[in-house]
């Protein structure tokens, strides 16, 4: 039986998490698959996937949000097959940034100008869809470091926007 890998949180701060991966077995490990999940404003679950080569590993994941719960799951690729999943949870330190105040204005039938307030030097994600279900499951999205973006949409549709 292949055991799940051991995920150990080494350190964390307001914008990064460092963790180590190892197997408590003599089975040869060729690498790990790691998923990092978090929920954006209770509407959209985000995920980042890391493919890590080698037996032992210490990883640092950056560009995270302060005071946000993250779930890290991992499984190992071994010479005998894939291991079961293991999970850890961690909340980054610091104070979570205030939600931006979004304004969306139609420019024409296929373009919407989105602008918002918020801190500088951060990455904003703009999510949009024609229903709450689509906004949660598979929204259109883009990212930017500015405070406005023009989004191209389908004509004759109503859209929901989230930044």
Image (cartoon, helix red, strand yellow):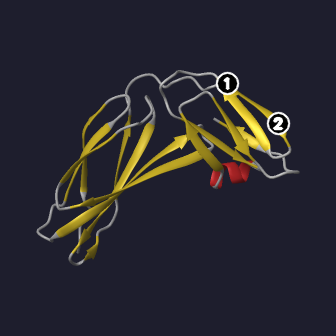
In the image, 13 versus 106, the foreground residue is 106
Label 1 secondary element: loop
In the image, 57 versus 63, the foreground residue is 63
Q: Eyeballing the image, is 156 above or below 114?
A: below
In the image, 42 versus 128, the foreground residue is 128
Q: Residue 72's x, y, as percent?
A: 37, 49
Q: Residue at x 60, y 26 (%)?
A: 99
Q: Eyeballing the image, is 131 above or below 76?
A: above
Mark 1 neighbour density, 10 Å: few (under 14) some (14–19) many (20 or more):
few
Q: Residue 5's x, y, as percent?
A: 25, 59
Residue 101: assigned label: 1
Image-quadrant location for residue 15: top left
Q: Eyeballing the image, is 50 above or below 66?
A: below
Q: Is residue 15 found left or right of 147 in the rendered image?
A: left
Q: Residue at x 47, y 51 (%)?
A: 47
Image-quadrant location for residue 149: top right
Q: Residue 161's x, y, as percent?
A: 71, 39
| Marked residue nearer the N-terminal end (1 or 2) | 1
Q: Is residue 55 found left or right of 84 in the rendered image?
A: left
Foreground mark, 1 or 2? Answer: 2
Q: Residue 18's x, y, as percent?
A: 27, 40
Q: Quadrant of the N terminus?
A: bottom left
Q: Is residue 13 found left or right of 45 in the rendered image?
A: left
Residue 106: assigned label: 2
Q: Quadrant of the C terminus?
A: top right
């Amino acid at each position: 039986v292949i055991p799940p890998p051991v995920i150990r949180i080494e350190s964390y701060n307001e914008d990064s998490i460092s963790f180590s991966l190892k197997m408590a077995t003599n089975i040869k490990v060729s690498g790990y698959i790691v998923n990092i999940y978090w929920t954006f404003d209770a509407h959209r679950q985000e995920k980042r996937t890391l493919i890590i080569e080698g037996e032992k590993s210490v990883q640092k994941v950056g560009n995270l949000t302060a005071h946000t719960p993250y779930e890290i799951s991992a499984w190992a690729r071994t010479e005998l097959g894939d291991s079961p999943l293991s999970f850890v949870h961690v909340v980054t330190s610091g104070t979570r940034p205030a939600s931006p105040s979004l304004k969306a204005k139609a420019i024409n039938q296929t373009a919407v100008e989105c602008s918002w307030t918020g801190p500088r030097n951060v990455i904003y994600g703009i999510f949009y869809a024609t229903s709450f279900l689509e906004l949660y499951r598979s929204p259109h999205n883009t990212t930017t470091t500015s405070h406005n973006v023009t989004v191209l949409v389908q004509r004759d549709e109503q859209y929901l926007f989230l930044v």
